[in-house]
Image (cartoon, coloured by chain):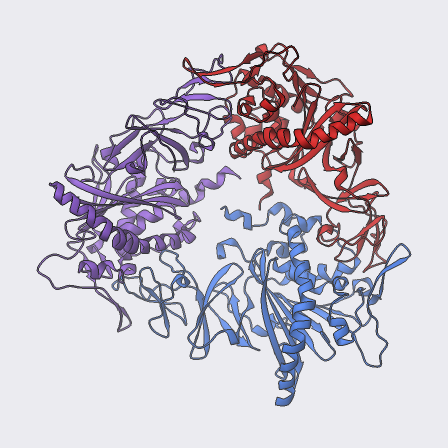
Chain colours: A red, B purple, C blue
C-alpha cells in the first residue's frame, strides 16, 4: 500500500488557498486534544486500545490516573495489545522480546531477553499527555517538542463549567471527521430531522431550514481561547414550508407557545467540537465531538449538559438522560445525522470532491469554519505520524 | 484511493499507436449510446438506478417516457437513490436539503430548505438523452456540448429493422467490456463451446475453430453509418478436428445435411455490439452488447431476433425464446463465454497485459476492431467523468 | 491496480546501502531454488498449482519426474489451471483455444483451433527447472538465460546428506518471507517460547534470551557453497531470568543434567533456509524454509532430520515424527512463531517500517544476514516477473 494515498495532492490544495490546511487535514489536526474514551469505561488497572488521527494508542488507569503510550514496540514494531503483559503496575512488557516501558513517560526501562542492552534507559516509546474531565478521557495528539495548550482551548466554551452536569455516549461512524463537523453545523440539514421522534416528544418547533442573513456568523479567534464559529439563530430567516413550484410538499413544526421552543444557536470549535444551545430542549446544551480515527472513520462523542446545583437535580437529569435524551436524541435524532454522514462520505472520500461540491448561501458558516481551521491549525496529521 | 489508477499509463499507450484510444478506453468510449435496462423492468413512475461507464444514473418513466439524470446532488454530492423523494411526477428532491430537480432537463427548480437561493433556476444536474427501442432503454453517455448522434449509428445494422422481433435478457459479468467484445467476436473461441447443449438441440454444425484466409474481414466505417468489423464465415478455413501431434483429441460437430446448419457471420460494432448471423439457429440473429459498468464489470445484454410478420409467428417465437433460446442459448452456451471472460479478466485487469498477449493469425479481426475503435472513438471515458 | 506498489521506493532503498537488495527483495530473491511441494503430495499424472515469488506455476509428475511450467497461456494469458486439459501424458492444452504445450520444455507444439498457425513450434511458455530431493520438490525461479546453480548451494549445509532422514510439513503463513527468516534466526525471540509444551516434553533447557558476545557470528560466503550466517550458542551469554527493575517476572527453564540439553546453533542460509542444531532435541536437526509466495505470504516448510542407518531406526523416527515432533514441535512451538510473524507483518508490510525499527545488540546476526543477502543475491524478484 502506497502511503501517498493518504496525502492530498498539491494540485487540489493549491485551488483552495483560504482553507488549504483544512483540505489537507484528512487525518485530523495535529497538536490538539481529543476525547477518546468514557471515563466509566476505564477501570483501575485496565488496559484499553484507542485509535486517534490514525495513531494506535494504548491507555491504562494507574492509581486513578490514565496514562497513554503508543501501541507499538520500538524494537520490531509489534503491537503490545496483541498480548498484554503488565508485570508491574507502572510498566508494560512487549510479548515478543520483553522490551519493558514505563507507562508514565514511555521510557524503555528493561529488556527481559537482553538485560544488558545499552538501549535501556535511553529510548522512549511515544507517550501522550492525558486529561480527564467531565467523564471523558482526552489525549493530546501532537509533536513531542510542542507543549500542549490548555485543554480549555480545545473544547467549546462552557463545556468545562463546574455546574454543568454532562452525560455521554460514544459511537464509531464511517465517515471522515470533517464531513461530520459540517453536517452537524449546517443550518439547512435540519430538513432531514423533520420526522424525528424528538419533535413531538419535546413539543418543540423545528423548521425545515434556517440561515443567517447574508451568512452572518461570529468568528471567535482570540489568543488563548477556543477558536470557533458561532451561529445565533435569533435573526435567522426561517423556512417552515417546503415547496415544489407552488405546492407545499413538506412542513416543519411550528408551535405557538408562550415559552421558547427553539434551539438558539449552533457553534463549531476547533479541533472538532459542536455546541448546540437549547437542544435537545430548552435549558439543555448538546455537545458533540467528531474525533478523527482514520481518514474514513470518526468517533462520534455525544453529550447533553445541564447546569445543576443539587444532588436531586442531578439524579433527575441522569434519569432523564437514560430514558429520554439517549433514546430519543442520540438514538433517533442523531441516527439521522449518522446516515447523512455515511452518504456524504461516498462522495467526499475523493479529495477532488471538495472542489466539485456546489455550496449555496446557507453554507457560508461552513466556509468560515474551513477558513478558521486553515488559519489556526497547530499542525496537520500526516501518514508519517501513523 | 488515487484516481490515477483508472488511467492507463502513457508509457503503455505510446506502444500501441494504432489502437491507443482503445487501450485507453478502460471505462468505455464516450459520446455513445448504451443499452442499460429492459423496458419491461421500468414501470410507469418507477425510479431505477444504473451505472454506465462508471457514471451513476437514475432513471424514471414519466407518462411513458424514460428520463435519466445523474444520481448525485449538485450541492454536497449525495446520491438521490439513498432515499428517493419524488413529490411531483416531474421532479426529484434530494433527501438531504430538499434540492429539487426536473427530470426532463435536470434543472434545479426548488430548494426546500432554502427557497430564496440564487442557485434555483440557474443550475442543472446532468441529464442524459434516452431512447427506447426494441424493448431496451438506451442512454447517451456523453459531453453536454456534443449533440448525440442518431442511435442507429451505435447499434449493429438490422438491429432496428421493423420486422425484427427481439427477446432479451441482461446479466452483469465481472470483466472489462473490451475483454467481452473480443471473446464474443473471436473466431477461435468456438473451441470452448464444443460440448454445449446447443449443438445437439439444434442439430447444428459447430467446428472447433475457423478463420478468414489471411484474416480478411470487412471494415465498415462510412460516415453516418455504424462502424464495425464484419467477418463472413463463407470463405473461412474451418477446423473440425483438434490434434495433438497425430492424435485427434477433440472434435467439432459436422452434420451432413441438405439445409445449412452453420452460423454465417459474426460482426462487432461500436461502441460494444456484436451480431451473429444465423445463430443460435438458421434464420435467427443473436445480438449482444457489452456495456461498460466499471473498469472490471460489464452489463451483458443478449438478444435473439427473428423477422416475423404475424401475431402467431410472434407468439411462437416468444414461446421458443423462453423454452429454448434462453435456457439452451443464454444460460448454457453463453455461460461458457461468461466463464472465459472472467478468466481473461484475471490477466487483462493489468493494463500491461495488453502488451504481453501473443496474438496469432486468427486474431487479426480483433486487431482490426481495436484499430477501428481507435479511429472512430468519439471520446474516451475517464475518471473525471465519474 | 498500479504495479508500482510492489516496488520499493528508491528513497528508502538509498538509505540502506549495505542491504539495499534485501529491502528490495519484497517478492524474494531471483535465480534461486525454492521448495514448493511435498513429493508425497504429487502422484503420477497429477497436476498441481503452486505460487512462488509471485509466479503462478503448474506442476505435473510424468513417469516419475516432476515438470513445471508457468500457469498462463501465451496467447490471451488465461490460467491453464482454470480447467485442466491434458490429452497426452507429455502435453497440456489450454481450455480456451487449444494451445498445447510440452511439459518438458514448454514448447507450443499444437493449437487445436488453429493447426496451421506459424506460432506452433516457435514459441515457448516458461518452463522451470525442477529437482526432487529429501521428499521435497524444488523449483528454480530464475531468468531463462541464467544456468541454475546446483541445488546444494541453495540449501543449508548437511541438508542433502545421505544418511539424514527427514520428515516434513508445509503450512502457508500471512507474512513476508523476510519477516519469517528474521523471526526464526533471532536469538532473543526464544522469549515467546518459554511456555511451550516442548520444554517439559523434552526435559530441555530453554533460556529467555541469548546472544553472541559482541554479535560474533560466522559468515559463510565461499564460492560454490551455501551462503549463510552461523550462530554457535557455545559462547553465548544466556539469560535465564527476566526482570523488571529488581523483580524477576519471567523465568526460562534450566536443567541440571549430565547430558547436554540445549540447542547448539542456529544458522540462516540463502535464499530462505534456517537450520537449528540439536533441536527439537539432542541429535535432531530442524530445517525451515520460508518460501516467498506473494509480498505478504510465505510457505512455511518445516523439517526434522536425524542421521540414521537401519530400517528400524527409520521406522522409529517416523513414529516419533508423527507422535511427537509434529504435534509438540511444529504445531505447538512453531505455532508461536507463526503468531509472531503475523504480528510483525502488520508493521513491516510498509516498506518504510524497515527504517523505523530499532534494532539492538542481539540483532546483529540479522544485520549480517541482510548484508549477506545484499552481496550474494543472484537477482531481485520484481512485478514484471509475475
Q: Which x, y percent locates residue A221?
A: 72, 18
| Image-based side of C146 in relation to B273, left or right | right
Q: Nearer the viewer, residue A143 or A224?
A: A224
Residue A179 seen by the camera:
no
Residue extending farthest right: C246
Image point (39%, 20%), residue name: B107
Q: Which x, y percent locates residue A320?
A: 70, 28
Q: Nearer the viewer, residue C361 or A184?
A: A184
Image point (19%, 55%), residue name: B213
Residue C189 seen by the camera:
yes
Q: Is residue A286 above or below residue C318?
A: above
| Image-based side of B276 in relation to C266, left or right | left
Asked where in the image residue A279 lies, by quadrant, the reply is: top right
Q: Which x, y percent locates residue A160?
A: 78, 25
Image point (22%, 40%), residue name: B156
Q: Which x, y percent locates residue C292?
A: 57, 61
Q: Is residue A283 above or below residue B362?
A: above
Q: Is residue A200 above or below residue B231?
A: above
Amino acid at each position: 500500500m502506497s502511503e501517498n494515498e493518504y496525502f492530498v495532492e498539491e494540485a487540489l490544495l493549491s485551488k483552495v488557498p483560504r482553507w488549504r490546511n483544512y483540505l489537507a487535514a484528512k487525518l485530523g489536526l495535529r497538536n490538539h486534544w481529543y476525547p477518546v474514551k468514557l471515563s466509566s469505561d476505564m477501570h483501575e488497572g485496565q488496559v484499553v486500545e484507542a485509535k486517534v488521527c490514525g495513531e494506535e494508542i494504548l491507555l491504562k488507569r494507574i492509581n486513578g490516573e490514565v496514562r497513554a503510550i503508543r501501541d507499538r514496540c520500538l524494537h520490531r514494531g509489534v503491537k503490545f495489545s496483541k498480548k498484554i503483559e503488565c508485570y508491574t503496575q507502572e510498566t508494560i512488557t512487549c510479548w515478543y522480546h520483553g522490551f519493558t516501558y514505563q507507562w508514565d513517560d514511555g521510557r524503555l526501562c528493561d529488556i527481559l531477553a537482553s538485560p544488558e542492552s545499552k538501549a535501556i534507559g535511553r529510548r522512549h516509546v511515544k507517550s501522550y499527555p492525558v486529561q480527564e474531565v467531565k467523564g471523558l478521557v482526552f489525549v493530546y495528539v501532537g509533536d513531542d517538542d510542542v507543549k500542549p495548550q490548555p485543554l480549555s482551548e480545545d473544547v467549546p466554551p462552557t463545556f468545562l463549567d463546574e455546574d454543568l452536569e454532562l452525560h455521554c455516549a460514544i459511537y464509531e461512524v464511517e465517515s471522515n471527521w470533517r464531513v461530520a463537523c459540517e453536517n452537524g453545523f449546517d443550518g439547512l440539514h435540519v430538513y432531514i430531522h423533520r420526522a424525528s421522534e424528538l419533535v413531538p416528544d419535546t413539543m418543540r418547533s423545528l423548521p425545515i431550514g434556517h440561515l443567517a442573513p447574508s451568512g452572518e456568523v461570529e468568528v471567535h479567534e482570540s489568543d488563548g481561547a477556543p477558536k470557533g464559529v458561532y451561529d445565533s439563530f435569533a435573526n435567522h430567516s426561517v423556512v417552515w414550508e417546503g415547496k415544489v413550484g407552488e405546492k407545499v410538499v413538506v412542513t416543519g413544526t411550528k408551535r405557538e407557545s408562550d415559552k421558547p421552543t427553539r434551539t438558539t444557536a449552533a457553534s463549531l470549535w476547533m479541533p472538532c467540537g459542536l455546541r448546540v444551545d437549547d437542544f435537545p430542549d430548552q435549558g439543555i446544551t448538546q455537545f458533540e465531538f467528531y474525533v478523527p480515527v482514520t481518514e474514513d472513520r470518526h468517533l462520534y462523542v455525544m453529550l447533553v449538559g445541564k447546569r445543576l446545583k443539587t444532588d436531586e437535580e442531578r439524579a433527575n437529569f441522569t434519569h432523564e438522560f437514560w430514558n429520554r435524551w439517549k433514546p430519543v436524541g442520540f438514538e433517533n435524532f442523531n441516527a439521522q445525522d449518522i446516515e447523512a454522514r455515511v452518504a456524504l462520505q461516498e462522495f467526499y472520500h475523493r479529495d477532488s470532491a471538495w472542489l466539485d461540491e456546489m455550496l449555496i448561501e446557507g453554507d457560508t458558516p461552513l466556509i468560515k469554519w474551513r477558513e478558521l481551521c486553515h488559519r489556526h491549525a497547530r499542525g496537520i496529521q500526516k501518514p508519517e505520524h501513523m
